[in-house]
Image (cartoon, rainbow, N blue to C red):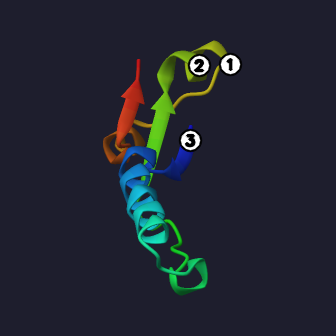
Amino acid sequence: MAYAPDYPYYFGVWAEEVGKALNGVAPRDIPIQQATKLTLMVNLKTAKAIGVDIPVGFLHTADVVIE
């Protein structure tokens, strides 16, 4: 399982921040953002290999399920 920031979304956010810096905005004036959009991924193949059973209800809440 992995619970991490949604990187494709944040690549766009980071690109906007770099664009601001390249357009003359001082880095101290660009706010630091904490990740608020997170993704839950579950790898069932690995879970089965190590003998861990994942409840079906939990799988329904996952954003990505790898079988």
User: Residue 57 appears in which quarter of the rendering?
Assistant: top left
Q: Could you tell me which residue is drawn at 58 percent across and 77 percent down?
A: 27
Label 1: state its secondary structure.
Answer: loop
Of 55 and 22, nearer the camera is 22
Of 46 and 38, nearer the camera is 38
Q: Please state which of the two labelled residues, at mark 1 or mark 2, is closer to the viewer.
A: 2
Q: How crowded is mark 3: few (under 14 residues within 10 Å), some or many (20 or more)?
A: few
User: Residue 36 appears in which quarter of the rendering?
Assistant: bottom left
Residue 23: x %, y % from top left: 41, 70
The answer to which of marks 1 and 3 sits earlier in the sequence is 3
Q: Are marks 1 and 3 in contact (CB under 8 Å)?
A: no
Residue 26: x %, y % from top left: 55, 81
The image quadrant where one finds the N terminus is: top right
Q: Do the residues labelled 1 and 2 touch (CB within 8 Å)?
A: yes
Query: How many discs mark residues in the rendered view?
Result: 3
Name the residue that disc number 1 marks.
50
Q: Could you tell me which residue is drawn at 41 percent across and 17 percent down?
A: 67
Q: Residues within 10 Å of mark 1 (few under 14, many from 20)?
A: few
Q: Which numbered circle lies on residue 2?
A: 3
Q: Residue flagged by tag 3: what amino acid is it? A: Ala
Residue 2: x %, y % from top left: 56, 41
Asked if residue 46 lies left or right of residue 43, the reply is right
